[in-house]
């Protein structure tokens, strides 16, 4: 038992060390930046069929980086998380079809505007709604934190509609197509690109966007001046030599299949599996990696909390109760955002998303584990402790030799249950941009608009892994019984 | 001075309450080496609490408890050392469910460094033979009957080679046909000269084995004396009432 535990701990330590070591590829001479983006924003930012991040933004950024001699690591996440990551120094810059607004100028420094855009609005293809005043009493679907959302909010009281929010564009389009909501507001080129690629929406104002404005590349106000200057310099150059126009035309004139693979690939589950097999596999590996590291570390932490919870010392018991109370009571996503986006601003150290994710799992799952471990120890009959103490064993020896072994046996079903919950909870970490299975699904859906099939595939993968995990746990349980 | 040495348990003016419930009132009692003291009395009279105080499973609110010369009413006393010399047998056996019969017996001597694993195994098997359970050494404790469990529990306590044995209603949880086996083991132990303090409802056993019988009622020792004095010529009125009730049943 002890040997097994030691082996596991060593393995986890090795995993983590490897994770940290493999994170910094930067060369010594060129400046290296972390750039946040939102990869669900075609044609500006999305994944192509080879899982490469492409789009107008991405091509501009890559071209400028090459010209100006800097390297960068791309961190895809939700739009809101991307802007917050820059504001909290987790990333150096953000390029995500971000409109330059006065409110944002308070927090960010923007580059030269690189694309002129405006707000469009769209309804389902066969919708009877023809003008904004038709929206009275209806609900519109918006993507959180976008200029489109801001515009819709500003005219909400004038036209009397309700609002529901989503964290990516595709889901909000789906909601309109499915008839749950009447219309959506967003950046005009994004809407037009989606329609061109088969999304069954009708853009209502293709000629005259509202609030016409500009997209800019952004850094935190007062920080990263060199990066911003390099971007501006490079942008002026590619605008002049025609590279910029080539990039824009490449995406706006393209057919869907150029980026998403042939239509036949997207019309069947097997086609989607085949054309995205490497993406699914990478996502699954990340999910498994998170799950294994999370389960092992959360179990160790939970056992520690549980043992503290039945310690002789009142202080340790109180500490255990408090820790369990705080982290069991906090929604996991709040905890993930707090660690990933909140904490670095205070302690001044960047926390890689994977580390933040594992920390979140340890604290959250560990609290639940601690609670049932404590309960398991407490449910061992009090006479066992009295008998052990009466023989002259110390409290800690009685715990180790008599109470803990019996308690652990009672807890095995709870442990199996917690392992399965941990596996499922890793999906929540997609919110901080960890490219695990769920986030992989989001990106694939953005690209091919096959929500039903892709999510069905993802669901089945989770079920298979959970079944395997259950089998493994039951096998281990039987072994410990024998 | 030579007489002092003979005193194994010295209890002076001990009080214990749980909230408003005054369980023990000014109890004093001395137990000599090799003496067998049986404590009788109605349920809730405080006799079990008193017994549990003799190895600090309960702490008195006031008064002095000395066992083997150690003041165990003082929280600073290293109770683990004292307990090594006090065997305790519980009403509900409290055998360790995660060990076999033999492991139950060898756990404490090995863990506390009194014996090597081999010595403990040898001694454990001898003790199992003494209580008539040689064939059960490698069985799980849950496969035993109540009477067998209690005999293992006695062997477990004896493995530490104690000076004093405490018994808290050792036969109360047993089916009637099992009681005899356990009492026989205890009788043999008494004959061997062990100092024993026993809480029980077995009056016949008390008459046969006790050097002294102590009657508890309402948290006080109402009467004590030889079995003849207590059972044949009870002076205390409450004792008379108690005996008439017990003997009827």
Image: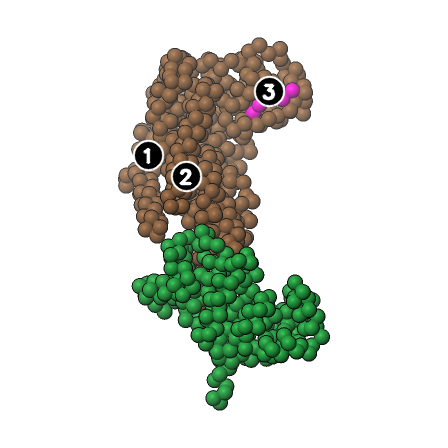
Query: Chain letter of disc 3?
Result: A
| Relative vertical location of residue B180 with respect to residue B192 in this rendering, above or below | above
Write down the residue under mark 1: A71
- Classify mark 1: residues with Cα within 10 Å, few (<14), some (14-19) or many (20+): some
Disc on the earlier residue, 1 or 2: 1
Q: Is residue A468 rendered to the left or right of residue A149?
A: left
Mark 1: which secondary structure?
strand
| Label 2: element kind | helix
How are the residues colored?
A: by chain
The residue drawn where x is 48% and y is 66% is: B184
Using a 10 Å C-alpha cutoff, classify the residue at mark 3 as few (fewer than 14 neighbours), some (14 to 19) or many (20 or more): many
Boundaries of the magenta span: A138-142
In which chain is the residue bearing label 2? A
Residue B121 in percent (x, y) is at 34, 62
Secondary structure of the residue carrying tag 3 is loop
Query: Picture quarter containing residue A212?
Result: top right
Question: Sequence-wise, which precedes: disc 1 or disc 3?
Answer: 1
Q: Circle 1 marks a residue in which chain?
A: A
Q: Is residue A160 left or right of residue B211?
A: right
Q: Are marks 1 and 3 in contact (CB under 8 Å)?
A: no
Residue labelled with disc 2: A474
**In the picture shown, does residue B222 fall above or below A276?**
below
Residue name at image x 42 percent, y 14 percent: A267
Tell me where residue B219 appears, x and y as whole percent: 66, 71
Observer-nearest of A296 and A33: A296
Q: Which chain is displayed in brown in the rendered image?
A: A
Quarter assignment of residue A318: bottom right
Q: Which residue is depicted at the point 54% across and 30% down?
A: A145
- A344 or A385, which lies in front? A385
Q: Position of residue A14 (x, y in %)?
A: 31, 45
Q: Is residue B144 magenta?
A: no
Mark sitting earlier along the chain (2/3): 3
């Amino acid at each position: 038992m002890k040997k097994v535990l030691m082996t596991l701990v060593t393995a986890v330590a090795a995993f983590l060390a490897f994770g940290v070591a493999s994170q910094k590829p930067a060369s010594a001479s060129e400046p290296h930046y972390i750039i946040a983006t939102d990869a669900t924003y075609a044609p500006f930012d999305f994944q192509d069929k080879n899982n490469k991040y492409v789009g107008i933004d991405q091509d501009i950024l890559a071209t400028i980086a090459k010209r100006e001699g800097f390297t960068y690591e791309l961190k895809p996440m939700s739009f809101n998380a991307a802007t917050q990551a820059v504001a909290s120094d987790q990333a150096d810059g953000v390029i995500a079809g971000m409109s330059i607004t006065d409110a944002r100028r308070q927090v960010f420094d923007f580059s030269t505007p690189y694309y002129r855009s405006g707000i469009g609005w769209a309804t389902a293809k066969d919708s009877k709604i023809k003008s904004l005043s038709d929206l009275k009493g209806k609900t519109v679907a918006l993507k959180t934190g976008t200029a489109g959302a801001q515009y819709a909010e500003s005219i909400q009281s004038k036209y009397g509609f309700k609002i529901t929010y989503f964290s990516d564009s595709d889901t909000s389009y789906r909601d309109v197509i499915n008839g749950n909501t009447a219309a959506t507001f967003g950046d005009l080129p994004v809407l037009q690109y989606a329609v061109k690629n088969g999304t069954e929406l009708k853009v209502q104002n293709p000629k005259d966007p509202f609030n016409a404005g500009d997209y800019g590349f952004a850094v935190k106000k007062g920080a990263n001046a060199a990066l911003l200057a390099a971007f501006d310099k490079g942008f002026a150059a590619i605008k002049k030599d025609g590279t910029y126009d080539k990039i824009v035309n490449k995406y706006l004139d393209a057919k869907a299949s150029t980026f998403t693979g042939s239509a036949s690939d997207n019309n069947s589950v097997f086609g989607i599996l085949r054309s995205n097999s490497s993406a699914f596999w990478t996502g699954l590996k990340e999910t498994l990696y998170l799950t294994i590291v999370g389960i092992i570390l959360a179990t160790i932490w939970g056992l520690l909390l549980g043992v503290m919870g039945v310690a002789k010392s009142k202080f340790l018991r109180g500490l255990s109760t408090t820790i369990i109370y705080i982290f069991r009571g906090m929604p996991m996503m709040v905890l993930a955002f707090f660690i990933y986006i909140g904490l670095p601003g205070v302690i001044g150290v960047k926390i890689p998303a994977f580390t933040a994710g594992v920390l979140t799992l340890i604290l959250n799952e560990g609290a639940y584990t601690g609670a049932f471990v404590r309960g398991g120890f407490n449910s061992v009959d009090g006479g066992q402790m009295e008998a052990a103490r009466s023989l002259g064993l110390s409290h800690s020896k009685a715990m180790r030799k008599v109470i803990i072994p019996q308690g652990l046996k009672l807890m095995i079903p709870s442990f199996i249950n917690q392992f399965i919950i941990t596996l499922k909870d890793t999906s929540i970490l997609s919110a901080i941009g960890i490219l695990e299975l769920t986030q992989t699904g989001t990106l694939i859906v953005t690209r091919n608009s096959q929500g039903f099939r892709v999510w069905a595939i993802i669901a089945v993968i989770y079920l298979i892994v959970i079944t395997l995990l259950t089998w493994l746990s039951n096998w281990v349980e039987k072994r410990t019984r024998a | 001075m030579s007489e002092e040495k003979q005193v194994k348990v010295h209890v002076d003016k001990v009080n214990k309450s749980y909230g408003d419930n005054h369980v023990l009132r000014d109890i004093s009692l001395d137990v000599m080496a090799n003496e067998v003291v049986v404590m009788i009395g109605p349920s809730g009279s405080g006799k079990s609490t008193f017994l549990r105080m003799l190895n600090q499973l309960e702490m008195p609110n006031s008064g002095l408890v000395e066992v083997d010369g150690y003041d165990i009413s003082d929280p600073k006393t290293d109770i683990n050392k004292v307990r090594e010399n006090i065997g305790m047998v519980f009403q509900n056996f409290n055998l360790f469910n995660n060990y076999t019969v033999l492991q139950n017996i060898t756990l404490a001597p090995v863990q506390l460094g009194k014996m090597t694993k081999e010595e403990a195994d040898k001694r454990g098997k001898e003790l199992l033979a003494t209580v008539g359970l040689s064939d059960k050494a490698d069985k799980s404790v849950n496969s035993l009957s109540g009477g067998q469990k209690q005999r293992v529990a006695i062997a477990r306590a004896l493995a530490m080679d104690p000076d004093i044995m405490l018994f808290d209603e050792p036969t109360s949880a047993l089916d009637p046909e099992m009681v005899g086996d356990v009492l026989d083991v205890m009788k043999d132990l008494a004959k061997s000269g062990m100092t024993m303090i026993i809480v029980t409802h077995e009056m016949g056993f008390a008459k046969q084995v006790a050097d002294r019988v102590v009657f508890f009622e309402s948290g006080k020792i109402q009467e004590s004396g030889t079995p003849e004095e207590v059972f044949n010529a009870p002076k205390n009125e409450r004792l008379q009432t108690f005996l008439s009730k017990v003997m009827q049943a």
